[in-house]
Image: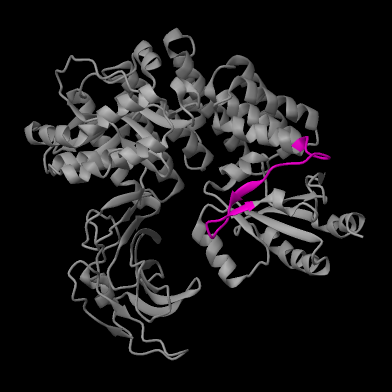
Amino acid sequence: MKLMTATDACCPVLLVLGLLGPALGASPSADQALKLTPIQRGVDFARPTAQQAAKCKISARKIGRHVGWVVEDPDGLVLREFVDTNGDNVVDQWSYFKDGMEVYRDIDADFNGKADQYRWFHTGGSRWAADKNEDGQIDAWKTISAEEVTAEVIAALAGRDAERFGRLALTSDELRSLGLGRQKAESLSKKIGHLASEFGSLAARQKAVTRDSRWVQFSGTRPGTVPAGTDGSTKDLLAYENVVAIFRTGDEHGQVEIGTLVKVGDRWRVIDVPRVISEDQAESPSAGFFFQASVVNRGKTPTAGPSEEAQQLLTDLEKLDQAADRATTSEQKAQFNARRADLLEQIADKARSPADRDMWLRQLADTISVAVQSGVYPDGAERLEMLFGKLKDSDADKDLAAYVKFRQLTAEYGLSLQASKPDFAKIQTKWLETLEQYVADYPASPDAAEAMLQLAIAQEFAGQEDKAKKWYGRIVKDFPDSPAAKKAAGARTRLDSVGKTITLVGSSLSGGQVDLAKYRGRVVLIQYWATWCEPCKRDMPLLKELLSKYDGSLSVIGVSLDNSRKDLADYLAENRLPWPQIFEKGGLDSRPANQLGILTLPTMILLDQQGKVVNRNVQTSELASELKKLIR
């Protein structure tokens, strides 16, 4: 293998694989490979010292179904991967790792020697950017989270970069795709029409966010769905209101009001000019574009920057998070989480507004609950109980108390499963009783929908389908706009489907559509599966055999619930399946999964020649006999 230097300064060094069948040429050194760096700045990836790099090793190997270089440290931890994905013996994918996980990737998708896409992974984030003219500058975002949008806004303000901000703003084409009613659409069109010029003016005059400023925290309550039909809209819309970004300049912290964010596909978009909140500011922030009444009435929006005490606590929290990797033993991890909980609670106590206090306490509850369920903070369940005790008797904190209570319950459930010899039947019975009590105590809490969904699922798995349908129905009735309602409605449809026709239309991997209605006249087996589901893959040989045996009378439709299109494509490239595949993003929470409330994999549904469901959960052991009855 040979190392070449690219002539284009924006392109990473090109690594030529020089593969001639199984024969390999001369390998570059690990030190040479480690000198490559990401095109985009600010990537936090493993950077061995010169002394450490001398001990690293590089080898050519197969990565998935491709070939490339892998650089590892002396302990075998991956530091870099440079891959040839199209078999032309030239690297077109440069991956950078931290703590053994890929955090960033440069991609040459058109195989011309220049990167045109950039992706962040794992602890690096979830962004995916396109660089159409391959000059090293991002032209558009394919995927970006709400949190990452706020970080980009801070970076745009710090760099006085109107173009960077413009890449985050809602476009006219995107506005048309939202399906808003005429009046709302016209109002939003006027707002976004002036974003670029107003941002340029703000960036030039504001002095709080400087080139030394760094994004620290996303601040905002949960996003909300604006249902189709609101103000004449034709589609559901997901939005955040009154979002705030916390930034740090030296030892000082500040806040920038981002305003409203709307989701368009896999991107969150800005519709407001950011507003720097000064320490002594008394002006009320905007009421929001979509949730005006509820936000104004609650009065839960930040109105001023953090106090000096809060700034110091934020600094302490940031330093603690930066040192998280140092906690390696169980005792150290418990101490880390206890200290982090202390800081979050103190920050909440110093909050200047009810919204800030609410936000920090919710983050505290989430942090503790996750830590308990992960087995690194067993004392956290008791701490959540104490926090709930402080909130439960306050009318102003009723919603917050319900939020904390649900996380306390899930933490205690997770903790009970970690016992040395858990009695699973007893634990499950108590858990279901706990969920029922939560629903009775907090029937209007958004978490009640999740509690009822878990109750319904448990009843369905226990064979108590009538009870399950009652819970599913209650979710749809009481929380029609919740994510749980989509799953619940689909589950009820599935449970009642035997003897009835069902609808299934979805996108294929190639971009077309697969429509169940077009298979009338044949027996159809629908297989819900994923590449990570080993039992699903073990069923494939039998399905192929049956398809061959009943050629012309039987059809199979696959519905992949993979989270990654690439995982599915890679599997199918090596394991050809002679039937169509439906794939849409979202995995077990995707639209095809929710349409029939799919809860577990594999799930297979058998339909007769008239399109009516014969068996809504057929097992492979039953297939042969079932098909004999249907196909003569």
Main SS of the magenta part reads loop
Q: Residue at x 21, y 76 (%)?
A: 6
Looking at the image, which residue is at 38% across and 82% down?
A: 89
Residue 318 visible, this orientation: no
**Rendered position, 626 above or below 113:** above
In the figure, is residue 195 to the left or right of 416?
left
Q: Position of residue 214 (x, y in %)?
A: 20, 41
Classify residue 432 as left or right of residue 201.
right
On whether residue 258 falls in the magenta region, the answer is no
**Depth order, front residue of 345/603:** 603
Q: Which one is nearer the viewer's eye here, 493 or 507?
A: 507
User: Residue 246, percent across and down?
Assistant: 24, 33
- Determine if the magenta segment contains residue 511: yes
**Which region of the structure is painted magenta?**
495-514
Question: Looking at the image, which is closer to me, 247 or 56?
Answer: 247
Residue 206 drawn above or below residue 350: below
Q: Nearer the viewer, residue 17 or 196?
A: 196
Report the colour scheme.
one colour
Numbered disc total:
0
Tell me the quarter of the picture where residue 504 sits: top right
Q: Image point 32% across, 42% down: which residue?
A: 148
In which quarter of the view is residue 460 placed? top right
